[in-house]
Each structure stands twice: as C-alpha cells, then as structure tokens.
Amino acid sequence: MTNSQKEFLSHFGWNDFFESQVLTMSSENLRIARVVNEEKNLYRVQVDKEKTIWASVAGKMQFTASSREDYPAVGDWVLVAMPPGSERAVVHLLFKRKTILQRKKVGEVSETQILAANVDTIFITTSVNMDLNFGRLERYLIFAWESGATPVILLTKTDLCEDIQSIVESVKEKFPGVAIHTVRSDAFTESDYFADYLGSGKTAVLVGSSGVGKSTIGNYLIGNNVIATQEIRADDEKGKHTTTSRAMYESFYGGHIIDTPGMRELQFSDHEQGFDHLFGDVEELISQCHFNNCKHQEEKDCAILAALESGVLDPIRWRSFNKLQKEVRHEQRKQHKWIMAEDRKAWKKKSMECRQKYKGWQ
C-alpha cells in the first residue's frame, strides 16, 4: 500500500477495526473504498482522496444476501474491483460495521432502513419552536445509543428564541450526560465546537425532522451550498422534505458529515440496547422492587411507586418508559419471527445452489 493510499484511508476514517478484517480476507485485485452516496441500486464510492466512481453490487454478493444489512449503505467500507475500461466498479465485499444507525422502514412489516454506517457522532437536530419535543428526542436517543455512536443534541434556530438558556437547562436536566449545543443560523462561526467532532478521520451524521436546519448546517460545514434547504412553514411550523437521499461530504474541519432526509416517523426494529441505555435509571429502580414480577401499581415495597411519590422519578418519564418499552418489545417479537423467515430463505438459497452443483456432476 502506497503512502498516498494510507493517507486517503486515514483521512476517511479507516482504523484498526477495519484493518483487522483485511487479514482474514483475500483482497487481490480489489481496492478499499468508502460509500459516499446511495441512489437506488447504485453506490458512489471513494477510491482515493480525489476520485469517486459509481459501483454496483456483484451478483454473488446479491445471491448470498438475506437482508438489507447485507448491502452497502452510506459510510460503509467495501472492497471493489475496477475492470479496465469500465466506468463502473463492482462491490465484492462489505466490511463489518463499527456502528450502524438504522430504523424500521416506514410501511414495511420487518424491513430496516440503514441511515448511516461507521459514524462516530450523531447530531440530533431540533429547532427551538413547536418542533422541540422531549418525547421525540427520547426516540432519537434510543436509535443513537443503539447504533454504537455518540449522540449530540443540536438546538437550532436559537436566534428566534428569547430565553434560550432556560431551554438548554431543561434539555440538560432531561438528558444528563448528553452533549447539548446551540446553533444560531445568523452566527455559525460561533459554533466552534464542531471542530471537536469533525477532525480528520471522524464522521458524523445529521438527523432530525424536516425543516429544522440540518441541510443549512451541512452546507456551512462543507463550505458550499450543495444541499437543498427549506424553511419551516409559518402556518404549522412543520418542515418539508428537501434532502431525498443520503450522502457524505467532506467538512472544512477535515472530517466528514452525512446528511439524511428529514424523518417525521421513527419506528423501532430491535433497539433494546438503546432503550436500556436511555432508561438505565428506571431499570435500576425496577430491580429494587421487592417482587420480581412487580406491576408497579399497588404492590408492597415497590421502588417505582416510592420514587414517583418522593419525586425521584418524573411521572412523565415513567409514562415514556412504559410507552416506548411496549413498542420495543413488540418489534422484538416481530423481529424474531422475521429472523426465522430469513433463515429459511437463506437455507433455500443454499439448497438451490447445492442442487445446481449436483446437476453438474451427472
């Protein structure tokens, strides 16, 4: 590997986690690349610091795939072949992901949608108007913690708010331990904290509802107005979708930023770890109940009831816990059924392959 290739890989976030996977795989005539854009069944991959090329997935890779997670997504590292004279590369292998931000696909029973892969930071953006909703922030944080990346809350359009400090304090009180920053649309240069998250080799993703300022922030960070923007409607303070696909751009800090379409609906698939991380304090209280099967209604020595009475546990947080827990558990049960179905699908593919080989022996 040349020094130029090493510099490219390091700059785009390649590290020992991915390097260790190369030792166990054959990479002859293949090049390491990172997916920077996804359009239907085509992927734009970065093959060196100055060059990108469109790529499609190899037939063998498609045949062995059993779910969406077996296909590339923006942020993924892949091995590609670049046939001489061809204007398109071929993806032959997908590296194991370090982090993965995904949600249940809207309108589907079990399919998941990968929003970004191998990101270090998830910027959860919300404007300080009617869009500021603690329940929605809880949902975003569950997705973020589940991904393995670090969530950061960005309160946008703070120039439209008279008492932003009280809002910041209320968000900090609600989500202790989560970094919270403010963004003024008329003073981006004051947001110097971005340098801490977007140095060379680091990747972040912007998520949030439509119209809260994701694309405006993205344009500032990359130093170019390449992402379409749309203001929130004045009548209902709701945004319109402007970003229609996921793409990764280089920021002027040296790291990379991924812009995603606005999301008004966040459906869980199997986000148990993220749920447990967000509600760890509530889970700890439940473990202190006298009875293992405590319903937290009128049982003796119930730690939840005691915490609610003393004010240690906020009733609103307790209601959120119960509501979101039901959603996560419900999706887990459906996910397990889906996994069984996908296993049967995978075995069917293997059986077909064996039959084809058997025909060749006759």
Image: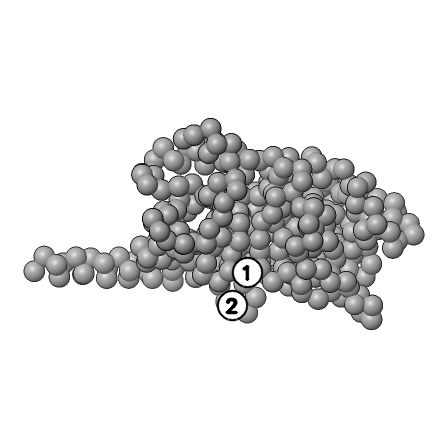
Residues under labels 1 and 2: Cα distance?
Answer: 8 Å
**Nearer to the camera, 118 or 191:** 191
Q: Quadrant of the C terminus?
A: bottom left
Hey, which quadrant is residue 265 in on the image? bottom right
Residue 348's spot in the image, x, y percent? 28, 62
**Nearer to the camera, 255 or 316:** 255
Q: Residues within 10 Å of mark 1 (few under 14, many from 20)?
A: some
The residue that disc 1 covers is: 104
Q: Amino acid at mark 1?
A: Lys
The residue that disc 2 covers is: 108
Q: Amino acid at mark 2?
A: Glu
Q: Residue at x 36, y 47 (%)?
A: 81
Q: Quadrant of the N terminus?
A: top left
Hey, which quadrant is residue 71 in on the image? bottom left
Residue 4's spot in the image, x, y percent? 48, 32
Q: Residue at x 49, y 45 (%)?
A: 51
Q: Residue at x 66, y 54 (%)?
A: 226
Residue 188's label in the rendered image is none
Q: Are marks 1 and 2 in contact (CB under 8 Å)?
A: yes
